[in-house]
Image (spheres, rainbow, N blue to C red):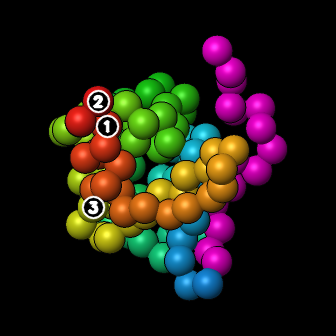
Amino acid sequence: MIDLKVVPGLDSIEVRNGSLEIGATSTHRSIERSATRAAKSTALAEMESQVANVRVRATGTLGGNLCFAEPHSDPATLLLVLGGAVKVESASGVREMPVGETYRRRLRQ
């Protein structure tokens, strides 16, 4: 098992090229409270403030939530509506795919 929370930069919340980019290890709480996020999406903050409870929001990550692919996930549902995408990286390269595509792939497994 690998703890991704120690990888520098994976917890970043930044605006690049007009898009909000959230690192895989950003916690729900850090997204909820981020000034950078606030400048781009109040809907995201409102949704994040309703995820489970404060303890879960302080430790649970957006990347973990999306990887789990829970069909009733609030973050995934909002990102689907907003047209969100995920950046996927492997030894063969980096690519972006819509959030919905990641769910279709996960559900086929």
Judged by depth in the image, the label closer to the viewer, 2 or 3, is 2
User: In the image shown, does 31 or 15 lie closer to the viewer?
Assistant: 15
Callout 2: few (<14), some (14-19), or many (20+) C-alpha neighbours within 10 Å? few
- The residue carrying mark 3 is 80
Residue at horizontal 37 percent and vertical 31 percent from the top: 68
- The answer to whether marks 2 and 3 mark residues whose Cβ atoms lie closer than 8 Å is no
Kind of residue sitting beneath label 2: Gln
Q: Are marks 1 and 2 in contact (CB under 8 Å)?
A: yes
Residue furthest bottom in the image: 18
Q: Which mark is residue 106?
A: 1
Q: Secondary structure at mark 2?
A: loop
Q: Secondary structure at mark 3?
A: helix
Label 3 crowd (10 A; few <14 / some 14-19 / many >=20): some
Q: Write down the region rendered in magenta.
A: 1-16
Amino acid type indicated by mark 3: Leu
Quadrant holding the C terminus: top left
Q: Which mark is residue 109?
A: 2
Q: Is residue 8 above or below residue 21?
A: above
